[in-house]
Image (cartoon, rainbow, N blue to C red):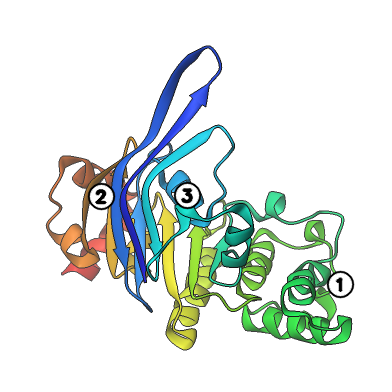
Amino acid sequence: MLAVESLRVTFRRDRAPPVEVLRGVSLTLERGATLGIVGESGSGKSVLALSVIGLLPRNARAEGRVLLDGTDLLTLSERGMRDVRGRRIGMIFQEPMTALNPAMRVGVQIAEGLRVRRGLSRGNARTEALRLLDRVQIPQAGRRIDSYPHEMSGGERQRVGIAIALALEPDLLIADEPTTALDVTVQAGILDILGDLVADLGLSLILISHDLGVIARLADRTLVMHRGAEIEQDATERVLRRPGHDYTRTLIDAMPRRARATLEAGRA
């Protein structure tokens, strides 16, 4: 359903030469599959995600093609991309505390898209928002729907972000570092939710992380990135068992000892 072909992204800078942030990255994602994108901070993972959903900053220039069911998203106007965002592609941002509006109750934030984009009444939008909070396993959703983001834990805020991304029933979900700064138990819960959504709803998922353990848990295929370029891309099991590049081996070796032992056990 998604094909990125030779994508290059350049950032213009005042009084300085432009910087090429993505250097000819290509990928494919089948419907209902999960693609993991892994690399250290600054490798271009988030810029790739923002290119797909059309949220690059104004000083960025993208070249290549981003095909969603054959339509090149890079050729669409802003109005055309607004029709794609939410309805076709949902995004879970890395830091929910900054992605959510601190002055709005979380139920209102989920219901906003339902009212504006799906035309639901206030009451029906609230009912659907409550259903989505239940779907992402918010405890006591009937009470927490009226909470503000600062009244929730980091894991709960991330679940609210997932609910917002799901509200318009997209075909593709992009999760940009969805488990950053969460403890191990909460991370596992978020990953379980994402895995269930792919299985139950038939969503396609792009999962971005610097953690190979997270990628190994969910991804069918893995794209390894470094300094804006594709290092290797293959079935996740093949990348983990027989990494084809020294950089990938370095990522595996850099994992904490316990996480690496778990990964090795899964590869055995």
In the rendered structure, the answer to whether residue 97 lies left or right of residue 178 reads: right
Q: Residue at x 37, y 77 (%)?
A: 31
Q: Earlier in the sequence, mark 3 or mark 2?
A: 3
Q: Residues within 10 Å of mark 1 (few under 14, many from 20)?
A: some
Q: Nearer the viewer, residue 78 or 95?
A: 78
Q: Which residue is mark 3?
A: 51
Could you tell me if residue 162 is visible in this image?
yes
Could you tell me if residue 262 is visible in this image?
no
Quadrant in which residue 130 is drawn: bottom right
Tag 3: amino acid: Ser
Q: Residue at x 74, y 76 (%)?
A: 114
Q: Which residue is mark 2?
A: 252
Tell me residue 165's x, y (percent). 61, 69
Tell me residue 15's x, y (percent). 53, 12
Q: Nearer the viewer, mark 2 or mark 1?
A: 1
- Which quadrant holds the C terminus? bottom left
